[in-house]
Image (cartoon, rainbow, N blue to C red):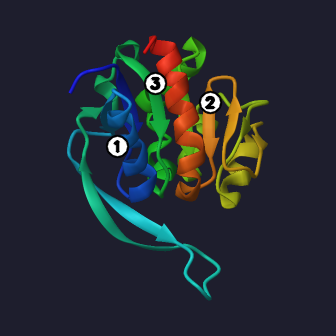
Amino acid sequence: MSGPKVLIIVGDATETVDTLYPYYRLIEGGFEPVVAAPEKRRYQMVLHEVKPGWTITKEWEGYSIEAEVAFKEIRPEEYAGIFFSGGRAPEYIREDEDLLRITRWFWEQGKPMASVCHGVEIPARAGIVKGLRMATVAKCKFDLEVCGGIYVNEPCVIDRHMVSGRTYHDSGHFIGPWIKMLEAATGR
C-alpha cells in the first residue's frame, strides 16, 4: 500500500462500522490507514445498536482488527491525519499519555482530524475542544461540553481541521469531507 499514512485510533470494544467504514474509504482515496492502539496486537471490535424496545445501546462482538503500531511508538509527523473511532474503547484509552500527546500534536499542527460517536472522549480529554463545535452521540454531549466544546446535533460538523459525526449512521456525511481535507493537506 502506498500513499500518505493516516492513523485510526482503536482499542478493545471499538465499534466495528465506526472503524471499518473510514478504514476502507481511506484506501479507496489513496491513503494508507494505520491502526493504532495501546499495544500492537489484535483487538476485538463490537457492534452497537439501540434495539427496538430498548432505551440503551446493546453490544455484541463484531470483527477483530490488528493494531500495527502502539501509541508510544507513534511519530505523529509521519502521518497526514488522525481518526478517533467510537465504541467503548475511547473511555478506556483516553487516559493514555502517548495518545493524548499525539492528539494535541495533530491539533497544534492543524492536521486533518476526525471523530465519531464516543471518539470525542479522546480530544475532549486531551484538552483541545474548548470552543470547538463537534457532533457526537447524544450521550457524549456532557463529555464534550464539560471540557468546553459545543455540541451540535448534525451528521457532519466541520470546525477548523476537525470533522465529526454523531454515529456510524453519519459516516456517509462526514467521512467524505474529511478525506477531501486530507487530500488538500497532502496535495493529492
The residue beneath circle 3 is 81
Q: Nearer the viewer, mark 1 or mark 2?
A: 1
Q: Amino acid at mark 2?
A: Met
Q: Which residue is mark 2?
A: 162
Give the SS element for disc 3: strand
Q: Are marks 3 and 1 in contact (CB under 8 Å)?
A: no
> Mark 2 falls on what kind of element?
strand
- Numbered mark located on residue 115 in the image: none
Q: CA distance from mark 3 to mark 2?
A: 10 Å
Asked if marks 3 and 2 touch (Cβ < 8 Å), the reply is no
Towards the viewer: 144 or 167: 167
Residue type at the position of mark 3: Gly
Answer with the quarter of the image where residue 133 lies: top right
Give x and y (percent) for residue 154: 73, 50
The image quadrant that residue 33 belongs to is: top left
* Residue 156 shown left or right of residue 101 in the figure: right
* Residue sitting at x 28%, y 61%: 63
Image quadrant in which you'd find residue 158:
top right
What residue is shown at x 41% (from left), y 49% (from top)? 21
Query: Residue at left 58%, top 31%?
Result: 126
Q: Position of residue 91 (x, y in %)?
A: 51, 51
Q: Earlier in the sequence, mark 1 or mark 2?
A: 1
Whole-percent x, y for residue 2 in the image: 24, 22
Res. 122 visible in picture = no
